[in-house]
Image: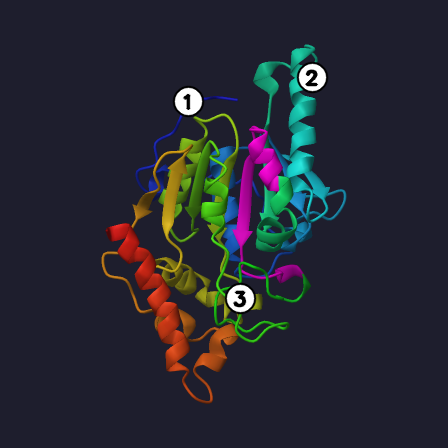
Amino acid sequence: MSRELAAYRNLKDISREEFILPGTSVCGGCGGMEALRLAAKVLGDRVVYVNAAGCFTLLAVFPYTPFRGSWLYTTMGSAPAGAQGVRDALDVLIARGKVRPEDDVQVVVVAGDGATYDMALSSTSGAIWRNLDFWYFCYDNESYGNTGAQASSATPYGARTPTTLGAERRKDLFEIWRAHRPAYLATVSPRYPVDLSRKFEKAKRFKGPKLFLAAAPCPTGWEFDPAKTLDYGRLQVETGLFPLKEAVGDGPVVHTYAPAKRRPVEEYLRGQGRFRHLFEPVKQAALIARIQEDVDRYWARVEA
C-alpha cells in the first residue's frame, strides 16, 4: 500500500473512482452511506471492513457486498475484537513470510452509534488501550436505526423516539475516546467532503487507533424527506450542533471548521418528525432554548 499522501485542496482533488458500488439496499438519502463512500475514496480497495450489526449490515447479502475489498460481519458488541483478530492474523502471516508487507491491508471497523456509544464501548476501549492499528468509522444516525430508531446514548436532547419522548443529553463520545489518547481522532460530515478527505488522508501517517465519528443524517429515523439530507447535514454543522474537529494523540483539539455565524438551532430542529412535538401543538420554547444554550456554551468554551 502506497504511503504517499495526497493533497485535498478542493472538490476536484477527490477521486472520481468509486470503491463502494451503487445499488445498495440502505435507505435513500442515507448520510452515513455518503460519508463512508467518501472515506473509501481515500482508503482505497486494500481494506477489510469489519461490520458491527446495524444499518450497514444491509450492505452485505451473502455472498455479495458492494465493496471493492473484503467484508467481515460481527455481532453488535464485538467489531473491535474482530478487527483485533484480523490485524493479528495479518501481522503473524507477514512475520512468517506468508504475506508480503506490500500486500498488507487496512482493517476498518464500520459501526453505528448503537454499537459505538453503547454495546461495543468496552471492546473499543480495549482495542485503543492495546494500541491496535486499525480504523474505526462510526456512522452516527443518533439512534438504533436498524431496529426502528429507538433511543441510543447518541440520541440528542429533546428528540422523540419509539421508546422515549425527549431523550437526555448525548454522551460526549469524542472526549471519551480522546481520554484514551488514540493515534488520531476526528469528527467528519459528508456535507464537508474536503474536510473529511483531508482527515482520512492525514490519519494515514499514524500507526495505531484512528477513530472517526461521522455525522449521518437519517431520513427514516429523523423523519424528513430524503431530498433534504443535504440541508440537514449542512445545518447540523452550521448551527454548531456537530463541530468538525480533530486531535492527534494527547495533543490539543483543533476545530477544522467553525461557522462564521452560527444558524439558530431551531432551523435544524424544525421539519424533522422526531422534533415535531417541540413545535406542535404548542411551541416548547424553553426546551428549544435549552438546546440552543448547550450549543452556545460549547462554542463559548472553544472561543475562549
Vertical position of residue 42 compared to residue 110: above or below: above
Report the span colored magenta. 124-146
Q: CA distance from mark 3 to mark 2?
A: 43 Å
- Disc 1 marks which amino acid? Glu
Extreme residue in the right direction:
62
Residue under the image location 23 percent in, 61 percent down: 261
Q: What is the x, y in percent for residue 292?
A: 35, 68
Disc 3 target residue: 219
Mark 1 or 2, closer to the camera: 2
Disc 1 target residue: 4
Q: Secondary structure at mark 1?
A: loop
Q: CA distance from mark 1 to mark 3?
A: 37 Å
Q: CA distance from mark 1 to mark 2?
A: 24 Å
Extreme residue in the bottom direction:
281
- Disc 2 marks which amino acid? Leu
Disc 2 target residue: 93
Q: Secondary structure at mark 2?
A: helix
